[in-house]
């Protein structure tokens, strides 16, 4: 367990304490936070950095989310959908590089049918010793059950904000749906998935109190994975229009910057000590020199090398100017491996299931080498 000397300067993480920590600017106090988060990370999930091979299988999407460049009305985006054989080739590449997990991510694409994804998951699981994480948006309970039955291990569904007003404004529903993503995460957990959620940091209208509530929601949901990234404006979304944005009083808007992302990662680690937390591509986009590395020494323990073929990668444009959109998978792997080893951290082995999930399930459903 972390040394009491490391943690003694940190007050109990009440809502107000979280707000105060999110507002913190004093370098000495921030250094205390970084050290505490790093110590908790080492104690609960260890020193290994787990690599998840990301495959962005389709950028078609039927949704109207105000923050995302994949939104259906963006007619300037070249759309693509990978074939099953292309996806399987990427999965084989992940295994050859030593990864224990592949992440199949897409916009909310109806052509990725229940049967097609179930077949794809079965083919991966039958031929490769990989965990399969799905990040395919809001689907029906029958889809989620079928994919779990086929062997899918994890499901990522970021809820983006726990503020109901912001959620409805920026994430309009499809049809007559009544469940929020927070409720969907509870349903996914009941199906036996290792569940991941997360939020955008600094989306217009997000106050410090909102972000503190998001952090507390991570703990309430007992998340196994938490994905955090700064809001990066896409010019072909409604949020590019200042008149569309939700406004808050002066001094209350959370800035969508690098420092705020590190604070949120560190506080998430303290609240959810056994969760897997990635240092994201969005962080590397803000700081191409050492964004991922700083995330890893401030609480994170996962990175997600992109295995999407370069001919498709530039079109998975949730936000613009993403890092590494032209690099080959081999070059991305070599770069990240060098960066991680430069921190003195070992590359994780096995599937790297969340210790939180393993504790909840008694070790079922994943590799215990996390």
Image (cartoon, rainbow, N blue to C red):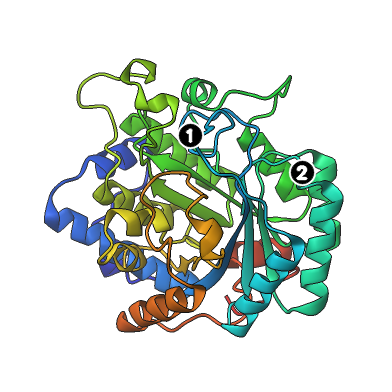
Label 1, label 2: how many angstroms apart (C-alpha)?
A: 28 Å
Q: Residues within 10 Å of mark 1 (few under 14, many from 20)?
A: many
Q: Which mark is residue 284?
A: none
Query: Residue most toward the top?
Result: 243
Q: Is residue 208 left or right of residue 122?
A: left
Asked if 178 appears above or below 8 in the picture, the reply is: above
Look at mark 2 in the image and give the residue it sits on. 111
Q: Find residue 17 and report its image quarter.
A: top left
Q: At which x and y percent is residue 74?
A: 52, 32
Q: Residue at x 33, y 42 (%)?
A: 18
- Residue 205 screen position, x and y as percent: 36, 25
Q: Which residue is mark 1?
A: 161
Q: Nearer the viewer, residue 58 or 252?
A: 58
Q: Is residue 145 above or below residue 140?
A: below
Query: Which residue does the image show at 39% across and 66% down from the upper left?
Result: 40
Q: Where residue 148 sits in the image (x, y, percent)?
A: 80, 56
Q: Position of residue 31 (x, y in %)?
A: 19, 61
Residue 284 in sight: yes
Q: Residue at x 46, y 61 (%)?
A: 278
- Residue 1 visible somewhere in the drawing: no
Residue placed most toward the observer, 230 or 2: 230
Q: Dots 1 and 2: beta carbons under 8 Å?
A: no
Quarter of the image with the C terminus is bottom right
Using the image, determine if residue 217 lies above or below residue 337.
above
Quadrant of image for the N terminus: bottom left
Q: Earlier in the sequence, mark 1 or mark 2?
A: 2
Neighbourhood count class around disc 2 (C-alpha, 10 Å): few under 14, some 14–19, many 20 upward: few
Where residue 43 sits, quadrant-wise, is bottom left
- Whether residue 155 sits left or right of residue 15 in the image: it is right
Q: Is residue 226 above or below residue 35?
A: above
């Amino acid at each position: 367990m972390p040394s009491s000397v490391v943690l003694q300067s940190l007050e109990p993480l009440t809502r107000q304490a979280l707000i105060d920590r999110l507002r913190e600017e004093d370098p000495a106090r921030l250094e205390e936070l970084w050290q505490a988060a790093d110590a908790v990370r080492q104690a609960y999930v260890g020193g290994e950095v787990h690599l998840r091979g990301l495959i962005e299988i389709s950028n078609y999407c039927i949704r109207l989310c105000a923050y995302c460049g994949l939104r259906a009305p963006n007619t300037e985006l070249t759309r693509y959908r990978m074939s099953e054989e292309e996806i399987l080739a990427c999965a084989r590449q992940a295994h050859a590089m030593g990864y224990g997990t592949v992440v199949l991510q897409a916009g909310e694409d109806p052509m990725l049918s229940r049967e097609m994804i179930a077949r794809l998951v079965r083919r991966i699981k039958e031929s490769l010793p990989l965990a399969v994480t799905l990040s395919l948006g809001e689907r029906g309970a029958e889809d989620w059950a079928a994919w779990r039955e086929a062997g899918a291990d994890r499901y990522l569904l970021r809820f983006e904000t726990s503020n109901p007003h912001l959620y409805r404004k920026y994430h309009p529903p499809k049809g007559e749906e009544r469940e929020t993503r927070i409720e969907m995460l509870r349903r996914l957990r009941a199906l036996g998935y290792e569940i991941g959620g997360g939020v955008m940091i600094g989306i217009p209208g997000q106050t410090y109190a909102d972000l503190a509530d998001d952090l507390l929601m991570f703990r309430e949901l007992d998340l196994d994975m938490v994905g955090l990234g700064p809001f990066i404006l896409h010019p072909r979304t409604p949020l590019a229009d200042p008149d569309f944005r939700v406004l808050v009083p002066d001094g209350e808007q959370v800035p969508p910057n690098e420092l705020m992302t590190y604070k949120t990662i560190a506080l998430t680690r303290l609240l959810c000590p056994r969760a897997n937390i990635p240092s994201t591509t969005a962080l590397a986009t803000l700081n191409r020199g050492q964004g991922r590395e700083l995330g890893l020494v401030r609480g994170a323990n996962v990175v997600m090398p992109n295995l999407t073929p370069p001919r498709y990668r530039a079109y998975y444009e949730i936000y613009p100017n993403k890092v590494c959109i032209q690099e080959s998978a081999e070059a991305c792997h070599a770069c990240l491996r060098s960066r991680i080893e430069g921190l003195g951290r070992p590359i994780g082995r096995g599937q790297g299931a969340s210790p939180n999930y393993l504790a909840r399930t008694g070790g079922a459903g994943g590799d215990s080498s996390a």
